[in-house]
Amino acid sequence: MARFKTILVILTCVVLAAALAGYIVMNRKKSAPQGSSSSISYETYVNVRFAYSVCYAPSLFIPQGEAADGDGQKFLSRDGHATVFVYGSNATDQTLQQNLNQETGYLTGGASPATIVQKSLGQNSFTISAQTPAQIIYEKTLLQDNEFKTIQIQYDKPQAPTYQAIVTMMVDCFVNTSGTTYGK
């Protein structure tokens, strides 16, 4: 009889612990801040021509369809405050440093010139963070197999709390897919 009571007490403790863990997990998810990437589901856009992929949140971004030449896609935010461009291009006559200089020139020139906040050049990639009076711009370019693969995200400054975690998630999952098989 004592053995039965011991087993019953252990089972009761296990059930209570499981219920408590479930309660904590459910409440943590409900209290995730707006824009938190952990509470958002993502889908993946794969570009076959230039062999890259990026994840995006369909609840926040609407894909505009792949470009006619198959180099990439534009995503518009549902609230109208953000735009994402992903695209590939051939790097036949340009080094990564030259492409970084070119992209920096595009951002700092034009009708609404941006101020470069940060830029970083790695062995096979570069990043640029920039700001205009109204927007924040983040760009990452990868170089593989003599091809540039770029993601550029622009969002309105007042929406930074909403988009910062989402931008981080999208940039982190922007990858080369050379050698990866999708589908059958």
Image (tube, rainbow, N blue to C red):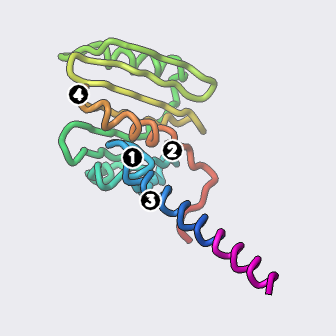
- Tell me whether the residue at label 1 lies in contact with that at label 3, contact meaning CB atoms closer than 8 angstroms: no
Which residue does the image show at 39% across and 41% down from the upper left?
Answer: 166
Q: Earlier in the sequence, mark 1 or mark 4?
A: 1
Nearer the observer: mark 1 or 4; the answer is 1
Nearer the observer: mark 4 or 3; the answer is 3
Q: What is the CA distance from the residue labelled 4 to the residue labelled 3?
A: 30 Å
**Which quadrant of the view contains residue 84?**
top left
Q: What is the CA distance from the residue labelled 1 to the residue labelled 3?
A: 10 Å
Is 134 above or below relative to 53? above
Residue 100 position in % (x across, y down): 46, 19
Residue 61 position in % (x across, y down): 29, 49
How crowded pointer 2 is (Cα within 10 Å; few <14, some 14-19, many 20+) is rated as some
Residue 173 is labelled as: 2
Which residue does the image show at 21% across and 37% down from the upper left?
Answer: 81
Which residue does the image show at 39% across and 46% down from the upper left?
Answer: 32
Dot 3 corresponds to which residue?
Answer: 26
Evaluate whether residue 42 shows in this view: no
Q: Which residues are magenta?
A: 1-13
Evaluate whether residue 68 shows in this view: yes
**Amino acid at pointer 3:** Met
**Which quadrant of the view contains residue 103?**
top left
73 or 41: nearer the viewer: 41
Q: Earlier in the sequence, mark 2 or mark 1?
A: 1
Residue 175 position in % (x across, y down): 54, 43
